[in-house]
Amino acid sequence: MDLCSRNGSIIDKEDASLSVFSVEFSYGFGVYENVRVSKGEPLYLNEHIARLFKSAQEIELEHEFSDSDLQSWTNQLINQLDEDNYNLKILLIGAKDPKNAEVFILPLKPKYPDRKLYKKGVKLITADYERYIPNAKTLNMLPSYLLYRRAQSEGAYDCLLLNRNGEITEGTRTNFFGVKDKTLVTPPAYDVLVGVTRTHVMDCAIDAGFEVKEEAVSIDNIDEFNSAFITSTSSKIMPVNQIDEKDFVISDELKNLMKKFKEFTTSI
Ligand code: PLP
């Protein structure tokens, strides 16, 4: 795990440095992705690369990298690493001249959630914050970082972000779903980062006979759900047992969906 990739060249992690004079990096003019590698295979790599390029387009970050560059550089790095399970961060940093944009692919050993949490559920807190250009995964992360840190200090797993109408959009690094019997409700795609996991969970839920709605979810109406969960590449489906002061149960329907999703992901 001491290696990484810079524009397709494998280099030592220590050499993956950026100048503090880089205005683009210090102003957050960059986009990124987090890809899970399981048993040496990058999961949903195509979708992550497509989203990286979409994020770049959203912030008008021009570059000369192609889909196949990123595919082959990612696989080249994976072949050089001697671990089976880890995450890869793909970081695309803009420049004044598109020729000078840079791509770093960095292996990370994230702390995957404690297995007990999938049985017990997690607590979430809420805060008022609207992400700028929500469909893009950019380096503009300060508010998310501070809110995540606040959540952690309060013993919560993440912080749900509320828009100006008091509607839940997403977590700082997760998507949100409310569960009412066999119906799932998740905030509309235009208001959130369209999570790769969110998309797969929605497909899996439809296959499993759930009705899936993309609708605004007001924080004042969360009582109408019996259960809730969040999704992300690292968390998969994480059940929620508390949002601020309101408690949730992990319903049989949600347990069933978690089981189906496990089967769904191991079958890929
Ligand atoms: N929403 C935000 C703001 C995120 O940063 C992330 C992931 O980092 C997600 C949702 C979940 O996306 P994914 O399922 O692709 O990991």
Image: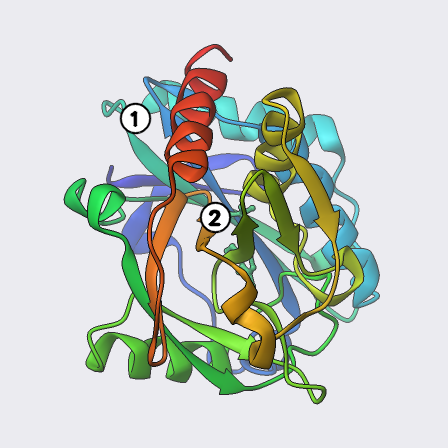
Q: Residue placed at 62% from the left, 66% from the top? A: 138
Q: Disc 2 marks which amino acid? A: Thr
Label 2 CB sits under 8 Å from any ligand 1 atom = yes
Would you place residue 51 above or below residue 16 in this image?
A: above
Label 1 CB sits under 8 Å from any ligand 1 atom = no
Q: Residue placed at 72% from the left, 86% from the top? A: 165
Q: Quadrant of residue 237?
A: top left
Would you place residue 111 above or below residue 72 in this image?
A: below
The N terminus: image quadrant? top left
Q: Disc 1 marks which amino acid? A: Leu
Quadrant containing ligand 1 reads bottom right
Tell me: 180 left or right of 55: left
Q: Earlier in the sequence, mark 1 or mark 2?
A: 1
Q: Quadrant of residue 152?
A: bottom left
Q: Residue placed at 28% from the left, 59% from the top? A: 122
Mark nearest the camera among 1 and 2 is 2
Would you place residue 182 above or below residue 102 in this image?
A: above
Q: CA distance from mark 1 to mark 2?
A: 27 Å
Residue 109 seen in this snapshot = no
Residue 183 seen in this snapshot = yes
Disc number at residue 231?
Answer: 2
Q: Residues within 10 Å of mark 1 (few under 14, many from 20)?
A: some
Q: Residues within 10 Å of mark 2 (few under 14, many from 20)?
A: many
Depth check, front residue: 166 or 266: 166
Question: Can you give x and y, in whole percent of width and height, for residue 144 in the image?
Answer: 47, 77
Tell me: 147 left or right of 184: left
Q: Which residue is mark 1?
A: 81
Disc number at residue 191?
Answer: none
Q: Residue placed at 57% from the left, 28% from the top? A: 44
Question: Can you give x and y, in whole percent of width and height, for residue 60 in the image?
Answer: 84, 66
